Image (cartoon, coloured by chain):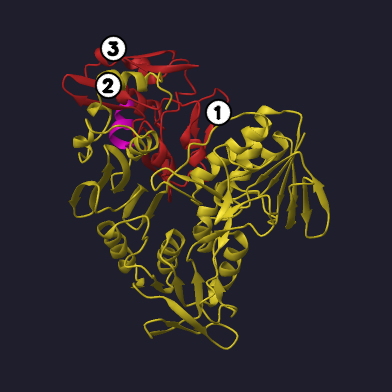
């Protein structure tokens, strides 16, 4: 199964992956609106601790603890085999966050309910937006 | 091969899923005394106050096509009276016998009805661990103006906040010195108590209910301190006890059903979920740990093992995630200790606490900055040596950047399985 490989030595802390992720997951698909108006949460997070930097996102575990911890089946494996959230049913109980061994699920909102936000490996694209946006192959899409 | 599963909730559903992945031909039958499609139990308080309804998909544990898609038979609204593990038969209360090749007991746990409280049989006394109890409370809600909630655990605390939010007068009575006693320490509990008080909940600690009075319906509660509280309803939420009334002598009981490392209770019989007494890797005892993430995993492993695998269940530990008002927390394992290394960061409603024994993490409390909680969960589960990284735990930006590079790359490349 192809995943986003994180090549930390190539990362230069430019945050373009985050911008691309926000845009891809926005309603408008417009960079400015996505970042400044819609306030989309990025599914990947760039960390920095000189000289290290890297963009971290869901590793799509084979034995995903978040799926087991989900109280109503919102966290599930889609037909591609990736771990995704059903945004229509998630209630934001954060039990997935409690068990995620990589710490890559964020707390979002959806109307009156909390909503777990995580990498869905861009179901509408052949190459994830973050990988395509990375200028330096710090993120690559390959078999892991 | 015929698999019979007792219980149609988290553990039972995951057991059936695992069996079907392994055995496409075998017959799977789930028996439950509940009539409903499996639902999300943690949402019952929200359902009671009308925030969510059974017409919404989020109320359910699995999508509607789950049973058809996995070719799983159900027998709903039937109570199991006895399990005969020698004859390999399940006897229903209507005297029907159902034979099995493999049995999985996932019957869960129900609210404890404290025997030392008199008047517990009065009308207006409720519990909230299943749909039957919740329904009674929901139907009567319109005529309830004031309610006494006994026990400030997860259910009691959440329900107290929710009922207060919709304008009911709520008194929350707790035997311990703080709310959410086993899940939070004093500092974190005070943050939750402040939220409860803000929403109008009256909290009484270090006290317990001894008597319920009323003419047919409860109208007054007496505490052991002698204090009397007028009310028109009482919710009992002092904990849960495993549903084990139907087991035979081949199945050993120690609070819950005793299981081995493969979740086996006796030959061809497994137990999983709230009913099972499992190994607590933090406290080093066997006990039921009635939480949903463990029920799901245990159910899945029991299902794998019942259908021919040999997968070890490594044990578990208590963990909780709850939000009350503006305060959200996640806690795991041990939450206070006088004899272990304790790391703490406190500032107003920000709180991080870590308990470390022999350089292994055994307990965590995170308040209002919880997104990295699972990384600590992993460390507890794996008994990870934290001596070289623990100095960074109190940083609010804790993350992969504090790990050793070689280790980080291996983990993120999925070369180290979870």
The reply to whether residue B61 is in sight is no
Residue contact between numbered discs 1 and 2, judged by CB atoms under 8 Å: no
What's the colour of chain A in the image?
red
User: Relative to B249, is B381 above or below?
Assistant: above
State how far apart marks 2 and 3 are (Cα): 13 Å
Q: Which residues are magenta?
A: A31-39
The N terminus of chain B appears in which quarter of the rendering?
Answer: top right
Residue tagged by mark 1? A78
Q: Which chain is yellow?
A: B
State how far apart marks 1 and 3 are (Cα): 29 Å
**Main secondary structure along the magenta-highlighted residues:** helix
Q: Which mark is residue B138?
A: none
User: Relative to A79, is A136 above or below?
Assistant: above
The crowding category of the residue bearing disc 1, from other C-alpha atoms within 10 Å (few below 14, some 14 to 19, many at least 20), is few
- Quadrant of the rendered image containing residue B96: bottom right
User: Relative to A5, is B327 above or below?
Assistant: below
Q: Badge 3 sits on which subunit?
A: A
Residue tagged by mark 3? A135
Residue contact between numbered discs 2 and 3, judged by CB atoms under 8 Å: no
Front of the two marks 1 and 3: 1
B354 relative to A114 in the view: left or right: left
Give how far across and how far down residue B338 sits, in percent: 24, 54
Q: Badge 1 sits on which subunit?
A: A
The crowding category of the residue bearing disc 2, from other C-alpha atoms within 10 Å (few below 14, some 14 to 19, many at least 20), is many
In this view of the protein, which residue sits in the foreground, B305 or B412? B305
Q: Which badge, 2 or 3, is on the more N-terminal residue?
A: 2
Residue tagged by mark 2? A54
Front of the two marks 2 and 3: 2
The reply to whether residue B289 is in sight is yes
Q: Which badge, 1 or 3, is on the more N-terminal residue?
A: 1
């Amino acid at each position: 199964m192809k995943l986003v490989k994180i090549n930390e030595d190539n990362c230069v802390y430019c945050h373009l992956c985050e911008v691309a992720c926000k845009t891809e997951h926005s309603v408008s698909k417009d960079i400015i609106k996505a970042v400044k108006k819609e306030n989309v949460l990025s599914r990947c997070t760039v960390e920095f601790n000189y000289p290290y930097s890297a963009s971290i996102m869901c590793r799509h575990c084979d034995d995903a603890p978040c799926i087991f911890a989900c109280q109503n089946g919102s966290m599930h494996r889609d037909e591609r085999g990736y771990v995704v959230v059903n945004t229509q049913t998630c209630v934001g109980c954060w039990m997935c966050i409690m068990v995620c061994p990589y710490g890559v699920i964020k707390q979002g909102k959806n109307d009156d309910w909390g909503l777990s936000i995580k990498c869905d490996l861009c179901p509408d694209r052949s190459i994830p937006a973050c990988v395509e946006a990375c200028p330096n192959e710090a993120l690559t899409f390959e078999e892991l | 091969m015929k698999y019979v599963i007792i219980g149609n909730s988290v553990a039972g559903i995951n057991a059936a899923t695992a069996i079907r992945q392994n055995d496409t031909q075998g017959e799977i039958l789930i028996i439950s005394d509940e009539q409903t499609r499996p639902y999300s139990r943690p949402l019952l308080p929200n359902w009671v106050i009308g925030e969510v309804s059974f017409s919404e998909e989020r109320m359910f544990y699995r999508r509607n096509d789950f049973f058809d898609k996995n070719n799983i038979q159900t027998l709903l609204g039937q109570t199991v009276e006895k399990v005969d593990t020698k004859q390999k038969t399940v006897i229903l209360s209507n005297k029907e016998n159902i034979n099995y090749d493999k049995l999985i007991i996932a019957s869960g746990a129900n609210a404890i009805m404290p025997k030392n409280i008199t008047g517990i049989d009065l009308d207006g006394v409720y519990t909230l661990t299943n749909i039957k109890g919740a329904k009674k409370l929901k139907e009567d809600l319109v005529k309830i103006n004031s309610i006494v909630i006994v026990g400030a655990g997860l259910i009691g605390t959440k329900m107290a906040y929710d009922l207060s939010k919709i304008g009911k007068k709520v008194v929350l009575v707790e035997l311990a010195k703080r709310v959410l006693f086993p899940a939070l320490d004093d500092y974190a509990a005070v943050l939750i108590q402040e939220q409860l008080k803000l929403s109008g909940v009256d909290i009484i600690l270090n006290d317990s209910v001894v008597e319920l009075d009323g003419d047919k319906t409860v109208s007054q509660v007496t505490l052991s301190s002698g204090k009397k509280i007028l009310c028109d309803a009482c919710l009992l939420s002092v904990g849960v006890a495993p549903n084990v009334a139907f087991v035979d002598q081949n199945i050993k009981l120690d609070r819950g059903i005793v299981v081995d490392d493969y979740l086996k209770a006796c030959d061809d019989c497994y137990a999983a979920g709230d009913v099972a007494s499992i190994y607590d890797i933090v406290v080093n005892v066997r006990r039921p740990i009635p939480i949903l993430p463990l029920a799901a995993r245990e159910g899945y492993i029991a299902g794998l093992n019942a259908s021919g695998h040999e997968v070890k269940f490594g044990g578990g530990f208590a963990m909780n995630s709850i939000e009350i008002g503006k305060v959200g927390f996640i806690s795991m394992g041990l939450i206070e200790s006088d004899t272990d290394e304790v790391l703490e960061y406190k500032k107003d409603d920000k709180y991080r606490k870590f308990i470390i024994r022999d350089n292994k993490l055994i307990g965590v409390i995170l308040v209002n900055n919880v997104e990295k909680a699972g990384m600590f969960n992993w460390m507890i589960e794996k008994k990870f040596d934290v001596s070289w990284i623990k100095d960074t735990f109190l940083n609010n930006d804790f993350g992969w950047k504090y790990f050793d590079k070689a280790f980080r790359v291996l983990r993120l490349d999925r070369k180290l399985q979870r």
